[in-house]
Image (cartoon, helix red, strand yellow):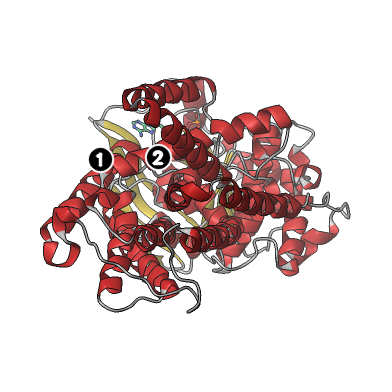
Amino acid sequence: MQTLAQTQPVAMPQPKRAWWRDIVGVALIAAVGLAGYWLFPDNLALLTRVIAMALLALSIDLLVGYCGIATLGQAALFGAGAYAAGIACVNGITEPFTLVLIGAVAGSLAGLVMGVVMLRASHGLPQLVLSIAIVQLFHEAANKASAWTGGSDGLAGLSPAALFGVFEFDLWGRTAYLFGLGLLLTVFIVLKFVVRSPFGMLCRGIKEDPVRVGAMGAFVFPVLLKMFMISGSVAGIGGALAAISTQVVGLDSVSFELSANALVMLVLGGIGTLYGALVGTVIFMGFEHVVSSINPFHWMTLVGVLLIVMVLFAPRGLTGLMETYTGLKLGKRGGRA
Amino acid sequence: MSDLFRVEGLSKQFGGLAVSRDISLSLPEGERLALIGPNGAGKTTFVNLVTGQLKPSAGRVFLNGQDVTGLGAVQRVRRGLVRTFQVTRLFSEMTPEEHVTLTILQREGRANRVFARFRGDSAVGGEVEGILATLGLLDVARRRVGEIAYGQQRLLEIAIALALKPKVLLLDEPAAGVPSTDTPRIERALEQLPPSLAVLMIEHDMDLVFRFARRVVVLAAGEVIFQGLPAEVAADDRVREAYLGSYAHARRVA
Ligand SMILES: Nc1ncnc2c1ncn2[C@@H]1O[C@H](COP(=O)(O)OP(=O)(O)OP(=O)(O)O)[C@@H](O)[C@H]1O
Ligand SMILES: [Mg+2]
């Protein structure tokens, strides 16, 4: 094989540097996040909720956008993180970063369980059905284990300690919001590295053709299971953030509805870029806030119409539209667009 | 017994249709074997059986004297049994460079790493460049596979197989769809393979077959009807009959 190199001394064209785009992207996310802080000081609770949902949507993108696994049960992982952080908090572990870590670990364990079950099925529809079944089971389990979770009343009375021992989680939600923004940026940067790693490339390959990946000598199942755990830890961080910021955990955090909404946000923004998850969440929840305060019925109608329009006319989501009209690539997509 | 690769009595039925019938053959180290036969003779099915993509109805597969019939496709690849696909199976959003890099990282057990750079290793980069150069793919190395010519995609199939450093290489019609100006690249790549490697090539291009093969096996209706030297194959009555068509298609099990 050593002799091959001498056959043709032509060099490959140099790789285009994608890094500056992501540096700009991360800077933009930070700028928008801080702008939200200054512009909407009365709505920081809502904005923190947006960040928690963005983490959930990101976690779905890892599965849908990079592995081709459809799921309508991701809130099981979000809820696992929320309840784990919540239960830890009412039992005396109140340091915020520790709570987030507990949420991440719980989410990734839930992801492991979910992956083991969902990967039994090899196709989209059975996987989708299993994911719904799992989130319903988690929901029921959280309901039944009321001694721990508070059941349908929810788990209340969380009082997380001050951030860095200095910044109290205040009534206006300033600390919670900035904490959430920091978490989101950190997670986003880490995920950008993950999806570009050898592992991330393997996942993209599996998304397009698992048989080819097998013929390359790589096992598919452990790779996907690993992604389920990474995805679970991201969702779990989102859940923990929700728990810390609202100081309650309710059954709605492990619901099918939450899972479905997060998937809609992701599809709206566009799959397989990570940016789409953020854009979709912000736009979806922004619209929801504005329209549903006028008339809740209109909101549901609008979501329906919006989805139909997106799927028919912009199947690659808002970020896809943006790429088309600006010629700017947000990053290599996880597979066929 | 010292054969690098051997199959014994390999059979496969789809429903009532016998697509492979009691196929036995072996490849010693360094073998260059051409497997030919009319369309639908069961050549691709044979490769699928051997590599573990399909489960045989009967028969065994041996690699280095070890029975690998019970192993999955991935395990067989890891033991050095590598194939290419007749209809390319590639990742349309990835570049040729990324395909080969991923394959080499996999071979070295590093493809599952989360906290590592994909393109960080210059030794891997050099090997990738060498393989792509051999197959004339350097100038499209960083284009999306979906954008490059079909012939180049076929060459990439071979590049991926070479990157695995196989012991036994099964090529399913490597030259089909490759422009004739590029077939010398395939031949050159094959000539540069380590001499100990055993290669089985399925091919319809008889010129290529005669230049490449030291031995020819003819498959018709799922059955081996000829094994021998390239020079003898054209004179064989059953082979001629098979190619005239009366024998070409798989028959019902009696
Ligand atoms: N999964 C399957 N189910 C049923 N029949 C099949 C299946 N796969 C292949 N066959 C049949 O088996 C026969 C052999 O097919 P195979 O693809 O192995 O032929 P081949 O020799 O590779 O032909 P070609 O030269 O056209 O590539 C064909 O008649 C085909 O229709
Ligand atoms: Mg074939």
* Residue found at x 21% / y 54%: A138
Which label is found at residue B229? none
Ligand 1 placement by image quarter: top left
- Host chain of mark 2: A
Q: Nearer the viewer, residue B118 or A36?
A: A36
What is the residue that sits farthest to the right in this orientation? A9
Same chain under badges 1 and 2? The reply is yes
Residue A101 coordinates in the image, percent (x, y): 41, 71
Crowd around label 2: few <14 · some 14–19 · many ≥20 (10 Å): many
Q: What element carries label 2?
A: helix
Look at label 2 and name its amino acid: Leu
Secondary element at tag 1: helix
Q: Residue under circle 2? A: A263
Q: Quadrant of residue A3?
A: bottom right
Q: In which quarter of the image is the C terminus of chain A?
A: top right
Give the mark nearer the N terminus: 1 vs 2. Answer: 1
Amino acid under label 1? Val
Nearer-the-camera pick, A60 or B173: A60
Give the label, 1 or 2, closer to the camera.
Answer: 2
Q: Where is A187 relative to A292, above or below?
A: below
Please name the residue that numbered disc 1 is placed on.
A129
Residue A133 vs residue B7: left or right? left
Q: Are marks 1 and 2 in contact (CB under 8 Å)?
A: no
Q: Can residue B24 be seen in this view?
A: no
